Amino acid sequence: MKAIRIHEFGKIENLKFEDIDIPQYNDDQVLIRVYASAVNPVDQKIISGEAQAKFPNNLPLTIGWDVSGVIEQVGNNVKDFNIGDEVFGRPFPTQNGTFAEYLAVKANEIALKPKGIDHLKAAAIPLAGQTAWQGLFKFGKLEKGQKVLIHAASGGVGSFAVQFAKWKGAYVIGTASAENLAFIKQLGVDEAIDYNSEDFTEKVNDIDLVFDLIGKDTQQRSLEVIKSGGRIITTVMPEFIEEAKQKNIQLEGFTAQSYPEELKQIGALVEQGIIEPIVSAVYNLEEAEKAEQLSSQKHTRGKIVIKVV
């Protein structure tokens, strides 16, 4: 099969498009014919070797950690899936990934693909969708009527977070670049702030939850707009924990985990037309390096998807 691999940690240019053996699957796994995958910021951290402490990997390594495809083989212990099922999910990043024509993955890391969307949109959901879901609801404890500020609201995680927060009944404020303000308004934000020309600390206050996808100065300044007892939930390093404590604010970082039940919940919202996965660019498998280079510029609207079939 064809796959995108690295043989040494370093630059995105280290990605190789090559022929490797179709993976073997065990009794608890299924073999998926991959139709689509998606690009995530964690890809670049793994490629560089920066993520070795969190996600230790052996080389050579097939990258990519979102999948949508069709089951071709089923392990002896697998009860919930059959050959021919369309599925999607996020394999754990310490194993060979999804920039490949086939993937062997544990059955408890996938769910049935939402009906009514193609594999390209389905592949955009797992990692970004579950990161947004867990940030808002598991860690952020967002409730109807609360005010949430979402930084980088136009990106892969942010575009899901805006839609989830509106579905929950929250008042949603989003930051984005000027060219993406109309886009995040279409997603549902109640207030859209241009982070280049406007200071969000002068525009908003009394926030219940900040969902921080940027960190550093943005995270620190977010402490100025949160009410006492509020939260900052971040996908990057929580750097200002002591300052947060002094203001009676909870600052917590997290790494999203893969839960099939969450995938089913998100998939149901997609099927109902409440949530739409946003795909801004599609690249063929052999163009994965171009896709990763685009992602590394950190200005993507929604998700970049890899088309395998």
Image: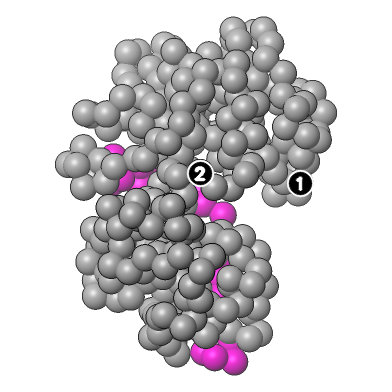
Residue receiving disc 2: 300
Q: Secondary structure at mark 1?
A: loop
Residue 163 numbered mark, or none:
none
Q: Is residue 251 magenta?
A: yes
Q: Position of residue 309 (x, y in %)?
A: 44, 13
Residue receiving disc 1: 50
Q: Residue at x 58, y 84 (%)?
A: 244
Asked if residue 128 can be seen in this view, the reply is: no
Q: Position of residue 287 (x, y in %)?
A: 59, 20
Front label number (1 vs 2): 2
| Left or right position of 62 against 83 | right
Please report whichever mark, 1 or 2, sits nearer to the chain's N-terminal start: 1
Q: Quadrant of the N terminus?
A: top right
Give, as a three-letter code, the residue at label 1: Glu
Name the one closer to the observer, 227 or 60: 227
Q: CA distance from mark 1 to mark 2?
A: 22 Å
Q: Is residue 203 magenta?
A: no
| Left or right position of 259 against 51 | left
Q: Quadrant of residue 59?
A: top right
Q: Position of residue 178 (x, y in %)?
A: 45, 58
Q: Residue at x 46, y 31 (%)?
A: 281
